[in-house]
Amino acid sequence: MLKIFCKNSKTYKDFQEGTTLMEMLEEFSFDRPYPIVSAKVNNVSQGLKYRVYNNRDVEFLDVRDASGMRVYTRSLSFLLCKASAEVFPDSRIFIEHPLSNGYFCNLQKADGLPVTEVDIDAIKKRMQDIVAQDLPFRRYEVREEEAIRIFRDLGKTDKVKLLESSHNVYLDYYTLGDTPDYYYGRLVPSSGFLKLWDISKCHDGILLRCPDRHNPDALAPLVEQPKTFAMFSENLKWNLIMGLNNVGELNLACQQGNASELIQIAEALQSKKTVQIAEEIYRRHYLPDPVKLVLITGPSASGKTTFCKNLSIQLKACGLKPISLSTDDYFVNRVETPLLPDGKYDFDNFDTVDHDALQKDVLKLLAGEEIEVPEYNFVTGIREYNGKKMRLGERSVLLIEGLHALNPMLTNLVPEAAKFRIFISTLTSISLDHHNAIPTSDNRLLRRIIRDFNKGAFTARETINQWPNVCDAEEKWIFPYQEQADVMFNSSYLVEFAVLRDYAEPILRSVPKDCPEYAEAHRLLHFLHYFTAVPGKEIPPTSLMRAFIS
């Protein structure tokens, strides 16, 4: 007999060896406001069909947990892919990237015609039929060469390249009905679990909509993101030009010795974009209503500070005189910082910044007055004035960088024509394969883990622990304003995960197995294994990535 500890109910129960998690679930009593979709066994994500053969701790999850939501959205992706293939034989569907609180999917029909509302209705009807049939998702563990043979016979070259370049001995693949597919994480037990979803026409493709993690009875609210879509499309275009549409193709390119050239191209593209932004600011600076204030924001670990420095150099090359401020120096004294519900400081809250003081100084600078700039002492938690003075002169532009720089309340007294807004983020455009999109937040989380660890600020466990609060704050305070930007800058690199791998793996392995954060560390380690490692020495000293790996 096995002794299983359920974290949800904080009780033990005995079970026969080989009992599935789904069978165990019926024996434990705890509050379940939403359907259980997966579980963590000893802090490792597992599907509900997982059979247990030893004493274990088990935590059952619904979609409010990030791990549970990933299981649900992977399963939805499989459902969409199967339905699309059945409605449009010989078509190809690409689950490309997050968009509008869902996933943008590109359906390429055999006849080459664009996707219509009628097409989407037909796919949706087939998806509903499959859900009603409650077909099982079956998992098979086979030797790598067997899985490669299966997908090669099906013409799935994207999966073949990924599996061939990842070098596993055994791996899992799934079937839904008679359709095989590969996903890099667990799925729900059957299609009947997928009660809440929708698909709709989006640009030239399909938007797969998922439940709202904060309100699982409803779909995540639809947010129009045309500028974000345009940025993703621009990067996907370059991926296709270089013949690197998925991680398998990227791995093969790196294994063939092309990593250095790919890095140089990525650096050139980012430099080119920075130059274009600087030239646009220069052009607007000499309009009748000149741009004098450049606002730069983005989520955590997007590279705001380094981008601000690079942009300053390019503005100087245009003949302007950039002067920079950071919203961090206008933090309120720590004792005045807003608190989270658990009593911890909410450092991402808008009211963490003394926005009244910041805006008064900005207005004085734009009026040609001199100000004394504060410096925030992060050791004492006090905003200090140490005699640092600043004044805008002829041809000067003021750059303000920080989490809340695009919040309208930060500069609501500044004329709109005087402002130029830049949103910077890591819009990961490459996918593992056609059906496995990479969450854009994984890029930033890995950057932050490495940077925090190398600076001695936080351990990987501490960074992972803080990450959900960081993401919640970004959803509230940062992302609502990204579409208001005049321009968006993508700070991700095509080869970034390949470079981060060697830095992140030893740090992630330091997370103890007996803590909740191990689940995320384990997932990230598994994810990084798909990438052929590229040495960090290939990254130039001036690269934006240096802020995270040096």
Image (cartoon, rainbow, N blue to C red):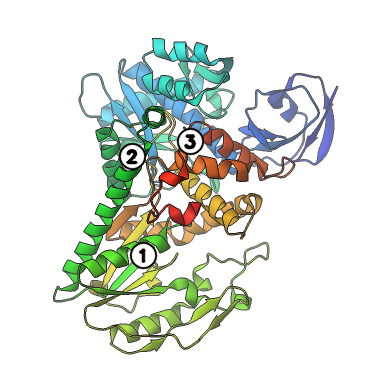
Is residue 355 depicted above or below 311 in this figure? below
Horizontal and vertical percent position of residue 417: 23, 72
Is residue 87 depicted above or below 451 in this figure? above
Residue 479 shown left or right of residue 113 in the figure: right
Distance Cα–Cα, label 2 vs label 3: 14 Å
Distance Cα–Cα, label 1 vs label 3: 29 Å
Horizontal and vertical percent position of residue 211: 49, 41
Question: Mark 1 and mark 2 in contact (Cβ < 8 Å)?
Answer: no
Horizontal and vertical percent position of residue 549: 49, 51
Residue 364 shown left or right of residue 164 in the figure: left
The residue beneath circle 1 is 308
In this rendered view, identify the residue nearer to me: 201 or 479.
Answer: 479
Quadrant that contains the N terminus: top right
User: Which quadrant of the view contains residue 50?
Assistant: top right
User: Which quadrant of the view contains residue 379?
Assistant: bottom right
The residue beneath circle 2 is 262
Question: Can the viewer see residue 134 in this picture?
Answer: no
